Image (cartoon, rainbow, N blue to C red):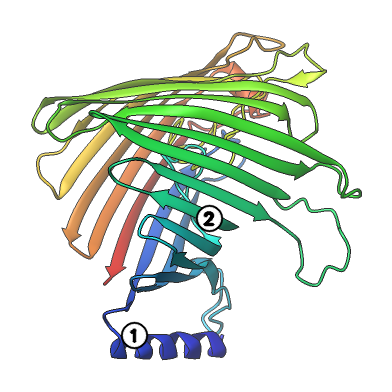
């Protein structure tokens, strides 16, 4: 820990000498949550809990005409996780990468990188949680008047000291993806292809399942137009993490319309294909890969992983934004299975999410929310709480974020 702190101090001191090239900033974020049926119904015999988490980040950014680099140090802990006489030792590297521009449009980045595309459904830095980052080589061609093309390649091992191939089951063994984006008039178009190899046998490194995901997005979001929308379609094929033959899809659409200056309405639906209960030979259940969980299908995170029978989420909401500093949103979700379950009907219940944001100062932001879930018998079946007396599911949080600039 002392060595890390000393290194950071040296880098920051160097930044004071070369301020035009090296920038430092950071973030301290505290979030307190009241969990009373969060993620799953809570049995009456158990008590709700209050949890407060602290996430700290220090960012070091270097850039000149040819070279760019970023290092993000991160510490995550819950209040009370370490006692008053122990500061703990949770500081680690969230991002560490370097980039070189071969031309003004073409560059290569190497290292641990947080990557995000489109609406963050397939790849996301997952800012709500502790974050997602990938160890990869990322080639970028970006020309604002033509198009953007990214190509990422990753190959993982459990240890740098491996002398022979060993099974790797932490995440994908290797990954390749292509992302293309181009604007046509007022419409932003993008396409994504991902191939990831999963080692499904912890004893045999030769057993790999190759999963392919391909899809496209069309988006309209312009300040001078009151209507905005995003249409998404993905198809998944190959083999899943258990090496079953895979054929699945995701269809999503959401639109928002500004009724008057402070008030807008939104409607949308997500459809994740699922596997029929009598299907044993192949999988038709869509996997969301490496995207954000909290931003889709309800803030209470009941369906961050869609059920095996798939998921249909029909939602609508209102956003009130009287000024640049404050906004509040209320959204209603109606959930159901995409395929008929073994028993009962498809209904999974509904959820109401209320979220508010307030910018106290340019460097200080306050956010809070309250959610309730109205479950059904099928909710209890999927969540394995059938025949269990449970509390009324609800969840609330308040979050304060300091931006250190």
Task: Identify the residue at the far right of this view.
Answer: 203
Dot 2 or dot 1: first in sequence order is 1
Q: Residue at x 15, y 50 (%)?
A: 325
**Residue 132 location, x and y as percent?**
53, 54
**Residue 300 location, x and y as percent?**
47, 37
The residue at which mark 2 appears reads as: 138
Inspect this view and state whether residue 42 appears: no
Viewer-side residue, 293 vs 397:
293
Left or right, 271 with respect to 365, comes to right
Residue 300 is labelled as none
| Secondary element at tag 2 | strand
Q: Residue at x 24, y 32 (%)?
A: 221
Viewer-side residue, 255 vs 372:
255
Left or right, 382 with respect to 131, comes to right
The residue at which mark 1 appears reads as: 15
In which image quadrant can residue 102 be found? bottom left
- Against 402, is 207 above or below? above
| Secondary element at tag 1 | helix
Left or right, 121 with respect to 248, comes to left
Which dot, 2 or 1, sits closer to the camera? 2
In which image quadrant can residue 224 be found? top left
Q: Residue at x 44, y 48 (%)?
A: 34
Q: Residues within 10 Å of mark 1 (few under 14, many from 20)?
A: some
Viewer-side residue, 141 vs 238:
141
């Amino acid at each position: 820990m002392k060595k890390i702190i000393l290194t950071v101090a040296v880098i920051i001191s160097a930044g004071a000498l070369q301020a035009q090239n090296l920038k430092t900033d950071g973030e301290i974020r505290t979030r307190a949550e009241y969990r009373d049926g969060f993620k799953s119904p809570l049995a009456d015999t158990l008590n709700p809990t209050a949890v407060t988490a602290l996430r700290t980040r220090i960012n070091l950014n270097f850039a000149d005409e040819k070279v760019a680099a970023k290092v993000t140090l991160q510490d995550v802990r819950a209040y009370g996780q370490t006692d008053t006489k122990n500061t703990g030792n949770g500081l680690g590297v969230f991002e560490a990468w370097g980039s070189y521009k071969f031309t003004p449009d073409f560059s290569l980045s190497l290292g641990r990188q947080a990557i995000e595309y489109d609406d963050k459904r397939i790849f996301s830095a997952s800012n709500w949680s502790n974050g997602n980052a990938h160890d990869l080589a990322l080639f970028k061609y970006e020309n604002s008047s033509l198009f953007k093309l990214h190509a990422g390649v990753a190959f993982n091992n459990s240890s740098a000291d491996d002398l022979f191939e060993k099974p790797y089951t932490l995440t994908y063994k290797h990954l390749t993806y292509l992302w293309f984006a181009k604007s046509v008039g007022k419409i932003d178009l993008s396409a994504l292809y991902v191939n990831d190899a999963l080692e499904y046998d912890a004893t045999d490194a030769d057993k790999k399942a190759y999963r392919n995901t391909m899809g496209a997005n069309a988006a309209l979001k312009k300040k001078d137009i009151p209507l905005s929308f995003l249409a998404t379609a993905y198809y998944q094929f190959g083999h899943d993490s258990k090496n079953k033959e895979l054929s699945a899809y995701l269809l999503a659409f959401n639109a928002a319309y500004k009724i008057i200056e402070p008030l807008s309405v939104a409607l949308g639906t997500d459809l994740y294909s699922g596997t029929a209960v009598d299907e044993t030979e192949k999988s038709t259940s869509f996997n969301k890969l490496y995207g954000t969980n909290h931003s889709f299908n309800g803030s209470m995170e009941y369906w961050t992983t869609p059920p095996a029978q798939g998921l249909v989420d029909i939602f609508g909401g209102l956003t009130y934004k009287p000024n640049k500093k404050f906004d509040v949103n209320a959204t209603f979700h109606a959930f159901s299975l995409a395929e008929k379950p073994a028993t009962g009907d498809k209904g999974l219940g509904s959820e109401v999410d209320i979220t508010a944001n307030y910018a106290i100062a340019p460097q200080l932001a306050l956010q809070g929310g309250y959610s309730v879930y109205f479950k059904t018998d099928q909710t209890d079946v999927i969540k394995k709480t059938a025949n269990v007396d449970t509390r009324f599911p609800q969840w609330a949080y308040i979050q304060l974020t300091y931006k250190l600039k």
